[in-house]
Image (spheres, grey):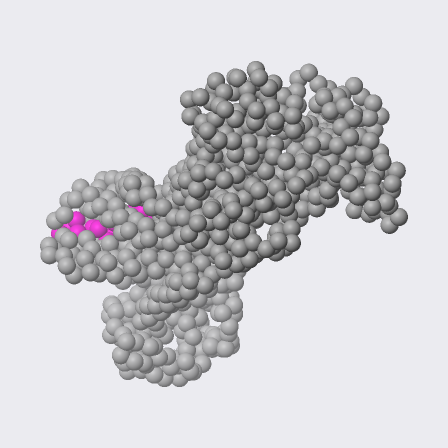
Amino acid sequence: MLLTVTDIQKTYQTADGPFAVLRGIDLCLAAGETLALTGESGSGKSTLLHLIGGLDTPDAGQIVLQGQDIAALDDTGRAALRRGTVGVVFQQFNLIPSLKVGDNIAFQARLAGKHDPAWAATLAEKMGLTPHLNKYPEQLSGGQQQRVAIARTLAAKPKLVLADEPTGNLDEATAGVVMDLMLQLVAETGAGLLMVTHSEALAARLSRRLHLRAGQVA
Amino acid sequence: MTQATLLALLSHWWRNPLQLFTLLAGLALATALWSGVQAVNAEARASYDAAAATLGEAQYERLVRPDGQPMAQATYVALRRAGWLVSPVVQGRLEGVRIVGIEPLTAPGGIGPVAPQEGADFGSFLTGEGQLFANAETAARLPDLDVIISPDIAPGTAVTDIGVAQRLLGKADLIDSLIVLPAQPRTRVPLAEIAADLTRQPAQGGSDIGRLTDSFHLNLTAFGLLSFAVGIFIVNGAIGLAFEQRRPVVRTMRALGLPLRRLILLMGAELMIFALIAGIIGVALGYVIAALLLPDVAATLRGLYGADVSGTLQLRPSWWLSGLAIALGGTALAASGALSQLARMPLLAAAQPRALAMAAGRRARLQGYAALVLLVLSAILMVTAEGLIGGFGLLAGLLIGAALALPLLLDACLNLMSKAAKSVTAQWFWADTRQQLPGLSLALMALLLAMAANVGVSTMVSSFRLTFTDFLDQRLASELYVRTDDAAQAAGLIGFAKDRVDAILPIQSTQTTVAGQPTEVFGARDHATYRDFWVFLQSTDDAWGTTFAGRTVLINEQLSRRAGLDVGDTMTLQDRDFQIAGVYGDYGNPIGQAVLGEAIFGMLYPDVAPRNYGLRMPPEDVPDFVAGLEAATGIPATQTINQAGIKSISLAIFERTFTVTTALNILTLAVAGFAILMSLLTLASMRVPQLAPAWAMGMTRRQIGWLELLRAVMLALLTALVALPLGLALAWALLAVVNVAAFGWQLPMYLFPADYARLGVFALLAAALAALWPALRLARTPPADLLKVFSNER
């Protein structure tokens, strides 16, 4: 099993006191499998994604990725996990505005020491970004920027791709194109995919779905 | 990983050159002001040290005649034969250059250019046809003599063999003083048996000139520190804004797996490289500032204290290194806050919004408490501070406390105005200004410090000038001063003057020690001049009357403070007790002073004969009198000093002093204006999303631009209102605490409202000029850019 999540709990402090976002979540994901995480706003989808990606730490529970317990890692260990094993696609793209498109695509792979120029060129080609490699992100449309973000994630050949509403900022037609490309490339790399989405249509295209309600699996 | 990260970090500056310029320029300007002032100070101090080394005056005890006249060379020979290890010195002036004649074979090492351990050419020095050593500047003033260039010789001084000096100065077989070597044989014959007419002048701990001019240098150093503090605020602001703008990128890089420690190390290294580059530019700029200021500083010190300082600047490795160290240290200081925030920054922006808001609130409260504690501490120190440490503690507490309190004060003011606003535009303006405050607060703190420094230092210098002018009126009451070389000239002068002037006031003094303090005792003739012109800090009813009658003594403030003597106390001179009748201000004098009546002075110090005289007469009679005196007695005009001339020279010197302080004032204010400009420019690009809604709801871009300009001027005005009392408190601390601790005398403080108003106008102009460009940029923002704010694609 690529990923096993057991009884994960997370609580935030708010103005009104502590708020339990996740209250004992369990899930598992095999390599090459795609899983949609759905639920209302505030149900804990993004929080769960962040915990699995090593961007945050759980209060209790276990997250085992490729046999390694993420919750037990320190900051350096989680950073190594993020650059080598996991790839995150954000809703806001989170590109580096001062780097050109080509450098953005190569960035995470370089961090991980896995930069493969041929693979990066293939990804750019498949994403239709080759003519834009020398442009800055601000010169691209939203759909193009999200394609750069996906290419950046896949360029590092992660074992697990985490996507947080990757098409949330795009129109329907562009979202469809971007989704097609992402699913195709994830399948080619054999990585697992865990995607947070509000869209029933997108969720239906993945192999499995997990619905969260008030921090628990519904 | 490192290469990819560095590429990403450096690409930010490539894409935002203005921010890079802000950072480099802020640090370079801060370093320039600091190193410029330090260079001037170091150059002047090096000149004093060279002077002290050349003359040996600081290190060695000397034998001199009490009346200051030369002694016969035979006395020197007799002393050497009696076992005394002494070395002769002859001094005098030639073409305005101080000629110092020494005997290299007996002189202690280090007081001349030719020391045995250096293996110098003794032969040419001893037997040359008038060979002299001097620096290049001095050598140019002696074109007819054989001068060897030696940069280590004090400015305005030429050193030569004693025989050459005697010949050049017309002092054949005469010696001015004898240096007493530290190690003396026990078997030597007592001084009284060989040369009873000589007295021992003790060695001094430091250079006289150095002590005299410490006041001037302290002011310059304080100014340099303040300028550097202003610069550090700019750097802090520039680094803070750069970090703020890079926060999303930093978060992304960390999310993509860059370890925090590596990121902090690389960002720290990046800043240090910038600091090094800016430091080199800053030190070079500082050199230019110093080179421009040094001629004025040299003229000021020469005129004010008689200190010869070279008017040209030498490149000294020490201040290159200290300038770079201060640039690196300043950057580290300014960056430490931003880096520590970065280390604590949560990886997810929206993870804990409430916690972040609470943390921001905690920081503001902490800043408020720190400001309160520092200001209360300053208030306590105002009453209790003694000594330099207390004085500087007071200055630091005042400045840092006020700077920390400024954003909170401004926020409270803006909140009040926001509540009082009636129109929607006004409400939006005040609320928007409050929102801008955190981004501008560091620049406004820099402006506060710059203005407070201006008010403080200008008040101090102007007060010094007014006080010194009054002091000149007091001390230079006589219309003409005449120096006589010997008893015959003195008699000739008195004979010629007695029927031609209103009064002859002999000036006679001797050195002694009172309560362990070196003190100069004067004997004053009973005359209305003293009663009319001298101002006491405290005195009995008839202080002059009892003093002229020989019953009391008057002392200066320095002696009063250092020896703990006040009016009514008793002090002893030559085993005779005198009650102190008055304490007078004596500005610029490093040692204690006491004034006795002429008669009792003559009884206590019968060997001291007056050589200088003050003459009272109508000012218009002075030129004829000087001409007549020369014709009748042979006393040349060069031995007379016209009071009006001295005053005009003194005032001219002060104008030069003002040139220095005005130049520094303008520089500091310019640096603060630059801080505002850079903050506004950096904020301008972040302002578009905030201004777009106002534009969309009906405000024109022109209106928005005007309001941006108004905002900067209004914030500068509020800052100026805080800076005025702070500057006055700073001036008070400098005059009443630091000056007393450092030099033993207190200066009265005068206020100069017109100067402050002018400074306020300058500050508002600087703020308006700084805001003009960013406001224009905002007013000309293309509608397409404003529309992007509402687009999902942004």
Q: Which residues are magenta?
A: B678-697
Q: Is residue A80 above or below residue B678?
A: below
In this picture, residue A201 sits left or right of residue B340: left
> Residue drawn at (61%, 34%), measured in percent from left and top?
B610
Rendering coords of residue B672 (x, y %):
37, 45
In this picture, residue B437 sits left or right of residue A6: left
Residue A51 visible in the current orientation: yes
Rendering coords of residue A54 (x, y %):
44, 70
Residue farthest left in this picture: B423
> Residue drawn at (32%, 50%), measured in percent from left and top?
B724
Residue B455 vs residue B162, the one in the foreground: B162
Q: Is residue B695 magenta?
A: yes
> Residue drawn at (49%, 58%), measured in percent from left and top?
B568
Rendering coords of residue B91 (x, y %):
70, 30
> Residue drawn at (63%, 36%), measured in percent from left and top?
B609
Q: Is residue B494 above or below residue A133?
A: above
In this picture, residue A126 sits left or right of residue B60: left
